[in-house]
Image (cartoon, rainbow, N blue to C red):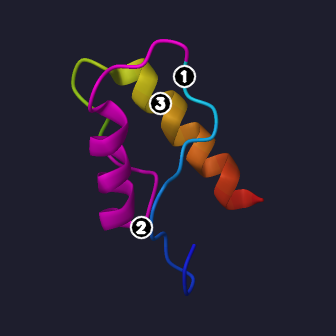
Amino acid sequence: MEGGRISKVDVFKDVQFVQEGVSDSLFEKVVIAQDTRVDAVSGATITSKAYLKAIENALVQ
């Protein structure tokens, strides 16, 4: 967070089965929307939902 806005998303512990490009695409959507209510990456719905829940949990703390 920077100035009350989401400026970037860092991964400290990645998901078990990483799919190339999913995190970058999803994190870009979150930063642009300033919200975790974004569309999942096609073909990586479960992974997207896991990332989004982790981001949501981090924002609450």
Give the residue pinned by disc 3: 49
Give the residue pinned by disc 1: 15
* Secondary-structure class at tag 3: helix
In the rendered view, tell whether residue 14 sits above or below residue 18. Answer: below
The magenta region covers: 16-38
Characterize the local packing of mark 2: few (<14), some (14-19) or many (20 or more) Cα atoms within 10 angstroms. some
Question: Which label is found at residue 45?
Answer: none
Q: Position of residue 12 (x, y in %)?
A: 63, 40
On the rendered structure, is 47 left or right of 55? left
Question: Which label is found at residue 34?
Answer: 2
In the rendered structure, which amino acid carries the disc numbered 1? Val
Q: Quadrant of the N terminus?
A: bottom right
In reply to whether residue 18 is colored magenta, the answer given is yes
User: 24 or 59, which is in the foreground?
Assistant: 24
Q: Nearer the viewer, mark 1 or mark 2?
A: 1
In the rendered structure, which amino acid carries the disc numbered 3? Lys
Question: Alpha carbon of mark 3 to alpha carbon of mark 1: how far?
Answer: 11 Å
Characterize the local packing of mark 1: few (<14), some (14-19) or many (20 or more) Cα atoms within 10 angstroms. few
Farthest residue to the top: give it.
17
Residue at 31% across / 32% down in the picture? 22
Residue at 41% across / 67% down in the picture? 34
In the rendered view, tell whether residue 20 sits above or below residue 28. Answer: above
In the rendered structure, which amino acid carries the disc numbered 2? Gln
The answer to the question of whether label 3 and label 1 lie on touching residues, with beta carbons closer than 8 A, is no
